[in-house]
Image (spheres, helix red, strand yellow):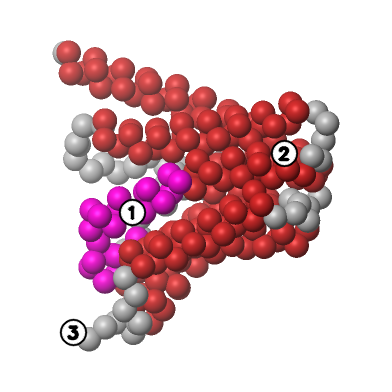
Amino acid sequence: MTRATFGEGLAALRSAQKPARGTAAYSRHVNRPAGRIVAAALNTVAMTPNQVSVVSALFSFAGIALLALAEVTVPTGIAVAVLLAVGYVLDSVDGQLARLSGSGSVSGEWLDHTIDCFKTTSLNLAVLIGWYRSGWTDDDAWLLVPIGFTIVAVVTYFGLMLMPTLRPAAPAAEPAAEHPLRKYLLLPTDYGFQCWIFVLWGVTEVFAWVYAGVFACCALLLAVALRKWWRELRAIDAEGRA
């Protein structure tokens, strides 16, 4: 079978994207377009989606390990941000490569989501370890921030994975128009955006306040999402009893 050229693959991917609605600005305008380019390139060398998932994990967990174990310096922070961001691009690549090559599988989807779950759980715990090791502040209350962020990130991930399985199958409908500011309001929850705040890692007090602000935004948006999900599920229950 003749494999698609880079140009053919890129054109095919541009017309076969997941819906953008509900996606934050960084993932929509930076990560997915970058992933398309990388997926089209890797398709020409017959790299498989599962191989890309593993390489993505290697980049991501190298960055997480640096956070936890390396000295808190500006170069460390830059290295962490780059490693996490590259890992995130590759996290977009595996799905796009599967669509392009027709090699999608339930095992591949499981691998992708399992790696994502490990990242979600470990990233903020690495911040906790890094802060504890560096002893940058005598106020131990700061250590509650990455703990809280871990809880918020895991519950958010769980909700995003669970909700589609609880919604009843329904005919596809034209989605309502999305407010133009929504993708920017969601930016603090965007993993790609969060990757780049680590360039401030070596400027510890500045990073701490930025990180705490992103955490507060994520916690607020989770509270809004939980209320929305609960009301949606209650409405489904009511319809089922009618």
Disc sitting over residue 1 in the figure:
3
Tell me the magenta residue range. Answer: 95-118
Residue 233: x %, y % from top left: 31, 22
Q: Quadrant of residue 211?
A: top right
Please tell me whether mark 2 sits on a helix, a strand or a loop. helix
Image-based side of 235 in relation to 55, left or right:
left
Residue 55: x %, y % from top left: 44, 66
CB atoms of marks 1 and 3 within 8 Å? no
The crowd level at tag 1 (other Cα within 10 Å; few <14, some 14-19, many 20+) is some
Please tell me whether mark 1 sits on a helix, a strand or a loop. helix
Between the residue at mark 1 and the residue at mark 2, the CA separation in whole angstroms equals 31 Å
Image-based side of 227 in relation to 217, left or right:
left
The crowd level at tag 3 (other Cα within 10 Å; few <14, some 14-19, many 20+) is few
Please tell me whether mark 3 sits on a helix, a strand or a loop. loop
**Chain-order first, disc 1 or disc 3:** 3
Nearer the viewer's eye, disc 2 or disc 3? 2
Residue 195: x %, y % from top left: 61, 53
Q: Residue at x 60, y 29 (%)?
A: 148
Decide whether the magenta segment is chiefly helix, strand or loop: helix
**Chain-order first, disc 1 or disc 2:** 1
Q: Amino acid at mark 3?
A: Met
Query: Is residue 94 within the magenta segment?
Result: no
Task: Identify residue for label 2.
Answer: 132
Task: Give the camera-side residue of 77 and 15.
Answer: 77
The crowd level at tag 2 (other Cα within 10 Å; few <14, some 14-19, many 20+) is some
Nearer the viewer's eye, disc 1 or disc 3? 1
Task: Identify residue for label 1.
Answer: 111
Task: Give the camera-side residue of 160 and 69.
Answer: 69
Residue 111: x %, y % from top left: 33, 54
Q: Is residue 210 above or below residue 72?
A: above
CB atoms of marks 2 and 3 within 8 Å? no
